[in-house]
Amino acid sequence: MKKYLQTKDERYLRVYYDLKPKTDELKKKIQVIENAEYFPHPDFNDVFEQLEDITRTLCEEKDSKKPFFWQQAKLLMEGCVSFLLEHEYVEDGKLKKLDINQINFKNINLLTNEGFTQ
């Protein structure tokens, strides 16, 4: 059994050391591209301010004795919307983002419920 585990570990190490230079090379290429002047760096400040205003409007309870609950609901909703905006998936070999119509209250609720049940 010990010999089997050693050979298995050696195979994993060989695969790791075969792939490591390739991943390091890709990381360097990505850094060069991201640091280039022509690489677009989006500014999401306005978006997050609007998102915060919307979630505050939806969740705030002005006469609440315990603001913790509506504040946590607001933060949870902001997090879900941010996650859905950043979510990427592969379809037909292409990397895609969610369509703007897929970022809605139904999907926010589904995402929240899935997070609480698991």
Image (cartoon, helix red, strand yellow):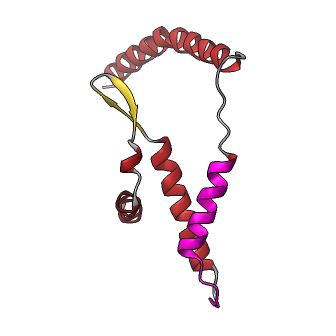
* Residue 66 lies in quadrant: bottom right
Q: Which residues are magenta?
A: 46-65
Q: Is residue 54 magenta?
A: yes
* Residue 75 lies in quadrant: bottom right
Horizontal relation, residue 77 to residue 103: left or right: right
Q: Relative to residue 87, is residue 61 depicted above or below?
A: below
Q: Quadrant of the N terminus?
A: top left
Residue drawn at x 40%, y 65% is: 116
Question: 44 or 69: nearer the eye?
Answer: 44
Extreme-left residue of the structure: 92
Residue drawn at x 58%, y 10% is: 25
Residue 117 x, y percent position in the rendering: 35, 65
Horizontal relation, residue 7 to residue 69: left or right: left
Prevailing SS of the magenta stretch: helix
Horizontal relation, residue 36 to residue 51: left or right: right
Q: Quadrant of the C terminus?
A: bottom left
Residue drawn at x 53%, y 50% is: 82
Residue drawn at x 57%, y 77% is: 70
Residue 51 x, y percent position in the rendering: 59, 58
Q: Relative to residue 28, is residue 49 depicted above or below?
A: below
